[in-house]
Image (tube, rainbow, N blue to C red):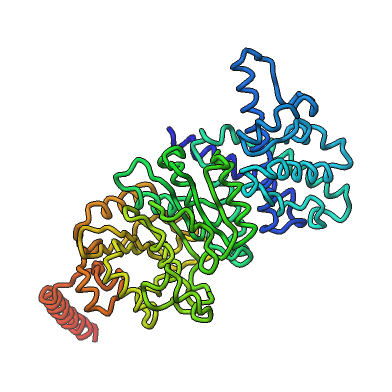
Amino acid sequence: MLNSIKEQEREELHKAIWNIANDLRGSVDGWDFKQYVLGFMFYRYISENITNYINADEHAAGNLSFDYALLSDVEAEQIRADMVKTKGFFILPSQLFVNVRKMAKTNPDLNEMLEKAFKAIESSAQGSDSERNFKGLFDDIDVNSNKLGTTVARRNEKLIKLLDSIGDMKLGNYKDNTIDAFGDAYEFLMGMYASNAGKSGGEYFTPQEVSELLTRLTIVDKTEVNKVYDPACGSGSLLLKFAKILGRENVRQGFFGQEINLTTYNLCRINMFLHDIDYDHFYIANEDTLTKPQHWDYEPFEAIVSNPPYSTKWEGSDNPLLINDTRFSPAGILAPKSYADMAFIMHSLSWLATNGVAAIVCFPGIFYRGGAEQKIRKYLIENNYIDCIIQLPSNLFFGTSIATCIMVLKKSKFSDDVLFIDASTECVKVTNNNKLTQDNIENIVRIFTERKDIDYTAKVVKNSVIAENDFNLSVSTYVEKEDTREKIDINELNKQIDEIVAREEVLRAEIKKIIAEIK
């Protein structure tokens, strides 16, 4: 029953987004369109969030007819300071989504009104503890862009359609939906514009199912964690899986992440708010994680999850300071300038708590290439930091068909070995992509937890054996593939051939006899 409700909610959401896409088709390209849809969803959400909060307070006090949306701006100003302190932001009644939408069709200055509202929301947090989490949040939503129309009137037509379409979406209570409405909308949008997204965004979106798998790998036998961290957090989908699975109150000290892409960084902060993560419970930074990490004062982290960019370039040996950086120096060598993958792994390991677990999606090349990467693998194995390597199916991610892997790191292991899991068949095919089902996820986590040899699926390998294999960490090196070819009994085959030859001889004799009789 729950699955049918889930699919119905998802179908309605996808249909609504598709209709908006048709309305804007030809004027706004896919990547920009994503910003407008998600930005207006966020605007609606925080408007409803603050309204519901204030209304609930008044209703509890006995004022059952109270509605903040009907209050005058002058009256509302009295609670500004309290709201900024409590919620981290403030919105005047006249600037609420519902009221702006109500007046949109008769307002020739709609674009200016929206721009003013967005700036007012951002500036309401200025000088407060929440400033860093609100600053620049609406930067990517340009209501005066020529992409919306060449005249103000045409732009406003598009803005009215956006307001109406987003306003009509059945999003309900974001916390209670059986689907992750915002995350699902983001994934659907990425799917609609996958080819463009992979190029324009410089990111590979992590499907929700892969996010769940990574999260579950880091919280085995845990009901809470202190802090979660993602060094390449994108839109925050990996971090937010902890809130979904454990409950946001069970991530005690909050959610931390860093993202180099400004647009995606803004989406991540928006995503945090949309999942009701309070402004003082997350710290997302916009900088290059490898050269300018922003969370020195908050590490170590009990849970680290990440899907860093594959084979991206970085400064590496060109920056003489990096070899002395405490994150990279223990290995005695830096990741190659053309492949920063191992740099992200070393960074994550450095900031991992003693009792923590890190689960990182990896490009398979780093497991068998020589040079600096082999030396870093040697360091990781000799210090017993690698707990498990999992081979994932191909075609799981938007933007790439590569069969990626997951590396699980631990600083406190009880055995000097590595578990290798071949999960390449743990999926179902959906259109052109593969997808992890709930059963697939549960099965992989079960194999990970039980940690024992399973024919053609899992193998526990001593670190000394890995050393003998030049520190090769490819799953295929240790887990034998099952031979599914049909087994042929040669003796039986020869017997059958002899019988066929004998029958042929009989047939030839009979044919010759018939021909002789005819002549």
Quarter of the figure that contains the C terminus: bottom left
Hey, which quadrant is residue 265 in on the image?
bottom right
Hey, which quadrant is residue 479 in on the image?
bottom left
Residue 11 seen in render: no
**3 to the left or right of 119:** left
> Where does residue 497 sit, x and y in percent of width and height?
16, 78
Which residue is at a point 31% across and 73% down the rendered structure image?
379
Quarter of the figure that contains the N terminus: top left
User: What is the total number of numbered labels drawn onto the structure image?
Assistant: 0
**412 to the left or right of 178:** left
Q: Residue furthest top?
A: 62
Residue 509 seen in render: yes
> Where does residue 157 sit, x and y in percent of width and height?
82, 45
Residue nearer the viewer, 162 or 139? 139
Which residue is at a point 24% across and 73% down the rendered structure image?
466
| 31 shown above or below 517 | above
Residue nearer the viewer, 288 or 373? 288
> Where does residue 189 sit, x and y in percent of width and height?
60, 52
